[in-house]
Image (cartoon, rainbow, N blue to C red):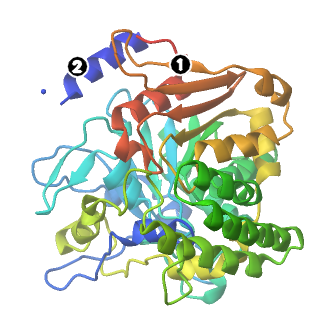
Amino acid sequence: MWKALFLLVLLVLSPGADGLFRSLYRKGHVSSPRKGDPGQRLFLTPYIETGKLEEGRQLSLVPPFPGWNLTSYSGYITVNKTYNSNIFFWFFPAKIEPQNAPVVLWLQGGPGGSSMFGLFVEHGPYIVSKNMTLFARDFPWTITFSMLYVDNPVGTGFSFTDHVHGYAIDEDDVARNLYSALIQFFELFSDYRDNDFYVTGESYAGKYVPAIAHYIHILNPVTTMKINLKGIALGDAYFDPKSIIEGYPSFLFQIGLLDEQEKKYFQKQCNDCVKFIRQEKWLQAFELLDRLLDGGLISEPSYFQNVTGCSNYYNLLLCTEPEDQGYYGKFLSLPHVRQAIHVGNQTFSDGAKVEKYLREDTVKSVKPWLTEIMNNYKVLIYNGQLDVIVAASLTERSLMAMDWKGSQKYKKAGKKVWKILKSDPEVAGYVRQVGNFCQVIVRGGGHILPYDQPLRSFDMINRFIFGRGWDPY
């Protein structure tokens, strides 16, 4: 059945930032509305707490945009009343069999990147054009999954807090707030509570995803409300900074971005950064890495920018980010859009404050939590072949050093060539699978993989979640 469904979708739809990562999401600058009525912010927690669930759901319904007949829901969930910390979500029930479709949470990286980037740039149903009209994405994940896009952590995008103590300073804080939001979400949308649940994300969300999965894993046995966690998917995941940093000099030299002299300098800086990490001097490690790669804290280009001439390290073939990745920002500034998604005149954060409070967290590892999840759930870790900042070889470097129940088999397992259709002349990518763990490298894609390779990403996530296997159709 799945094969027939996929081929039908294919037939119908086929066409004739940040510390290291947040800068990517800053392109989509969202200003406050200047003219028109943006409406009011919708806080759903009072409706959840008083049992007015149907009223809350109806209020959260997003009116269809012109030319669209698409059901979605959005609003705020309060996760800390003391600090008035609120998380914004936008939920799209699956187009096909929403009553049975898995619920998939998407978390953007950064730290401080809004999941509105994932929605509009990567795999949501809408694409924003330069003239602010919406058109349909060819392979949105919302066809087969009920997608839950969340601005995480508190202070990201439309999510906000009224107090400095409302910001997360580590992954425990991130997970605690996000767990509160999820529990309330599944109370409000109780008909989705028993559906399979997957946590997904990319880049810096390589920390968020294991953190919330760990939290669910620990609390499910001892709480009344269970979240039906089945697995996680991590794209170009920054889950083990030390291992990635150690691999940068050789990798950047091998792909031609550094010469021998530059490699020696890079090697020394990375060695110093790793030394700081081992000594738990987190801030010093972060500041050194920032000067080396990003330049967010200094008034001049980073070393990487100086020696490569490029500001973009998300795709080996691109020196700057594509212009259309920022169009969604202007769209979210429009008063009628703000009114529709119930955010009112709330300031849209570019993530700078979120990053400020998570600076020490940026160089810490979540490998123990990821190991725990790999031992108990389905896990997909994927990379774009053309990514620079979290390259496939650097991810494999981390995986080879991990100790989980399938690690010995993983080290001996060969990769499989993956094609979507038997008739395809092109190879979609390469897969290494051991039990419930899949490692995938997608050809022709960079850090923002679903943007670069929408069909291959769509096929990959569906094969993983539905357990279709990796044989061509």
Q: Is residue 40 visible?
A: yes
Q: Is residue 85 visible?
A: no
Residue at mark 2 = 11
Question: Count the marks: how many?
Answer: 2
Give the image quarter of residue 303. Answer: bottom right
Name which residue lies at 75% across and 46% down.
398
Q: Position of residue 45 (x, y in %)?
A: 51, 66
Please state if 408 lies on the left or on the right of 187 as rendered.
right
Looking at the image, is mark 1 or mark 2 earlier in the sequence? 2
**Residue at the extreme right:** 279
- Is residue 111 positioned above or below 471 on the image? below
Name which residue lies at 58% across and 77% down.
355
- Could you tell me the amino acid type at mark 2? Leu
Residue at mark 1 = 417
Is 399 or 269 nearer to us in this picture?
A: 269
- Is residue 41 positioned above or below 403 on the image? below
Q: Which class describes the residues within 10 Å of circle 2: few (<14), some (14-19), or many (20+)?
A: few
Q: In which quadrant will I find the N terminus?
A: top left
Q: Position of residue 448 (x, y in %)?
A: 43, 50
Is 190 or 346 nearer to us in this picture?
A: 346
Question: Which element type, helix, strand or loop, lies under badge 2?
Answer: helix
Q: Which class describes the residues within 10 Å of circle 1: few (<14), some (14-19), or many (20+)?
A: some
